[in-house]
Image (tube, rainbow, N blue to C red):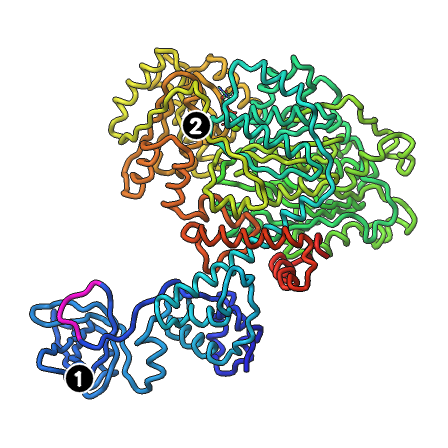
Amino acid sequence: MINVSTNLEELSWIPRPRLLALRRLGIETVEDLLTHFPRRHEDRTEFPHFPREESDVPICLCGEVIKTSLRRFGGWKKIFEATLQEPQPNALSEPLVCRWFNLHYVQKMIMTGQRIVVFGKPRLRGKRICMDHPEFEVIENDEEISIHFRRITPIYPATEGLSQRVLRGIIYRVLNDVSGTAWEPIAPRSLVRARRSDAVRAIHFPETWEVRDAAREHLVLSEFFAMQMLIAARRFESSARPAQAHCGAGALPDKFLKSLPFELTRAQRKVISEISRDLAANYPMNRLLHGDVGSGKTVVAIAAMLLAVEAGYQAAFMAPTQILAEQHYEVLRRWLERLGVHIALRTGARQEESGPMPLFTRNENLGSARLQRAGDGILPSRTFLESESTLGAHYSRRRLPHFEKPWAIYAVTIATAHRRSLSLQARTIVLNAWRHFHNTRYELFAICVMPHHVHALFQPWPKNEASDEETTFWSLAELMRSLKSFSAREINRAEGKVGSVWEKETFDRYIRSDRDLADKFHYILRNPWDAGIAKPNEDYPWVWTQDDEVHIAESSSPQNATTSTLQACAPQISADEPQIIVGTHALLYEDVSFSNLGLAVIDEQHKFGVAQRARLTAREPAPDVLVMTATPIPRTLTMTIYGDLDVSTIDEMPRNRGRIVTAVRDTSKLGEVLSFLRTELERGRQLYVIYPLIDESEKLDAKAAAAEYELWRERLHPFRCELLHGRIPAAEKQQVMDRFRRGDTNALISTTVLEVGVDVPNATVMLIENAERFGLAQLHQLRGRIGRGEHKSYCILLSSNQTQEASAKLAVLERTTNGFEVAEADWELRGPGDVLGTAQSGLPALKIGDLKRDADLMRRARAAAISIFEMDPRLELPENQRFRRLIVEQQGQSFSHVS
Ligand code: ADP
Ligand code: MG
């Protein structure tokens, strides 16, 4: 008897090539095989009588071959025909003619007198009923036949190297051999009644359609339940973490709200009160705020931050791009400085505030001076993503040295040229060089600078401005080039030397697993001692890990700094710290920049992965976290991808909003469109022209952007245009935006860097070129840039060569400006995976359930999971042990809250 965990290799009857093909599908055990569920089923139950009419659904028939013939037509072409008669013919019976064109082997397989089963669509050809190219089989053994025909037959997802028949045959046999008691139930009895083994059997070979449906429901519920247990575990785990209340009495936010030139909407008020309840509680807030573009999320976020500030905590406001961070900063300064709130901006390009800047003072510090680093250091924990899970990530293959994966982690070694020895000063320069780009271009886990080489462990980051669909990563080669030249220049300058510092080659290795990461990490930390550069009880300051930054912050008062001569000169962090820090998401990695973080607000969550959020929530003590998104999320997704968050919704727009009219126009109508644009410009309104770029990073496209810009300048003359795209340096970009905001510029020709959050109320016209190339969600985001003031706004979607698909998509936008409707339609057109990148959620992939179709089952599974946790949050009861195992199995690590 075989078991669910039996490896298929142990089954000697499966030929080796088949095993290999199965393994390519990730199928190794009996359980893997039997949970390779059919994609659909075909009704191949046998019809007792031959049809007399055509049918659009294929049917299964069995009969005796009474005649065969081979006919030629058109020279070399051949038709083979086999005429079948039904088993118990009567006077009214019609024979069935099966035909195969140019299939030589069929004629060798079928002979008069045989019984065969066929499956196909009957068609009327003249007076005859024909079936062209049916699936067929000669009946020699009735059991074998019954696997593939005369039943509701499973059709599996397409598999390379395995035909449906072979796969079906293997599954059939394994199902017969596997012990029925081997299947442990997944879902509780309250959710599913039948035995899991019966459901598995029935999903493959159901007796009836009702049985199939029941089996599917069982398996979907089980799958959803497992997922919801994982989500609930995360949720209970995070709410059990120690945290403080971060809520002031409310006088400060009140003062702020009173100073606004408008009244809050009912929805905004409701959400603020939901947030303040969370802030006041002594468990960490994990809340998602979603509201359509322009619904006024920023004001809500500010009110929340002021509550935290009033209670004596810092608040952080993180935006996905520099432009947005700058814009938030301006808004906050305008509204809050007069309330005496101290605000700071922290982005790669600009650091600004009235007080000192603790972030920068840190750069003078070197690695901490703890002795003997063996086994020391907090190991970075990572998820190793497969390339398909990093949705939309684009990695140019042209940027060799070798193929580089998004989110890859590398261990690199750089040697000095001609074994040039790095002086102590040079080592400091190198270490600082690496730390300089840390958190802007990559994340640095560990580094050690040795006299003749550098070892580092790091992960390249996406480049900042890229939008969702065109994420480009810093390439290894690019990074090495800038690190080497940057540090070489500094070293030569400091030492008054010339000549090369570094070897041309860099040794790099791609890290493949947590194990690998841990090994490399410890190797780097131990290196100076293992290599004998430092004595066992001696300090080596040029070893650095991320937690050193925290230690530096903690120990940076002079009396603690005696451990290191280098630290002795570190300036003290001022007590006068900003109360609100605005920055990009990179702020997350700047541990030191917060001394007392109470609330973190993350704007535009859809640009922000679960892993990053986890990073924030893992801090001790845990801050409250509010993530905001303008991409409305359909209900089922809020139960899954964001299932561990509480959800607040702003479902109402401020009343003063002008209408947005959207129109799709063919490129041939550009003339009319232009004259319309000019009229609006003459009325004093401003214009966005958006054009798509495939890859922001390509030089070629910068050229295209420039050409585009010239064209538009001519078209709109004498109105003033400016150009905005991803390759413009951040500072300049900011100036362009400022001029547009002030109205100095009439039109902005831009790529999708404009996509999120930009707020210029007088800009009321938007023209999107090649609109069909954008996704619906993105178009909706873009359109959200207009309609922000009281003027009526216009969005024109220019599109050529409209396919049916493209026009269906664009028509959605003509029809509605409601983001939720757009999101639903998007889901309808593309499927949920694409809408938000389920893969990024860190949840297991679904094998059978369908997030949209099975929304109701998801609701039931969620309720069941939550109720188990509510009764037994630590899963201690004996009857809940199997659920605990279920969670541990899925997340591949222990359930820390429980164990
Ligand atoms: P989003 O939700 O897209 O981030 P914002 O917070 O940027 O939207 O708000 C868009 C604009 O609406 C801003 O100019 C903001 O000042 C304004 N606004 C916010 N709330 C209201 C309100 N209740 N009434 C009128 N205008 C508002
Ligand atoms: Mg916003």
Q: Magenta-highlighted stretch: main secondary structure? A: loop
Q: Secondary structure at mark 2?
A: loop
Any atom of ligand 1 within 8 Å of the CB at mark 1? no
Closest to the observer, 509 or 581: 581
Image disc number at residue 538: none
Measured as percent of width and height from the top left, residue 449 is found at 78, 44
Seen in the picture, residue 439 relative to 302 is either above or below; the reply is below
Q: What x and y, as percent, mark residue 361?
A: 77, 27
Give the mark nearer the N terminus: 2 vs 1.
Answer: 1
Residue with the mark numbered 1: 88
Q: Residue 442 location in percent, x, y?
A: 64, 40
Q: Callout 2: few (<14), some (14-19), or many (20+) C-alpha neighbours within 10 Å?
A: many
Left or right: residue 368 compared with residue 23: right
Total marks shown come to 2
Q: Nearer the viewer, mark 2 or mark 1?
A: 1
Q: Which residues are the magenta region?
A: 50-56
Name which residue type carries label 1: Gln
Which quadrant of the figure has residue 818? top left
- Dot 1, crowdedness within 10 Å: few (<14), some or many (≥20)? few
Q: Is residue 706 magenta?
A: no
- The residue located at (63%, 64%) in the rendering is 882
Q: Residue at x 71, y 44 (%)?
A: 241
Element type at marker 1? loop
Residue that numbered label 2 is attached to: 784
Q: Is mark 2 within 8 Å of ligand 1?
A: yes
Q: Quadrant of residue 722?
A: top left
Q: What x and y, as percent, mark residue 599? A: 67, 32
Residue 672 seen anywhere in this rendered image of the structure = yes
Q: Is residue 571 above or below residue 220?
A: above
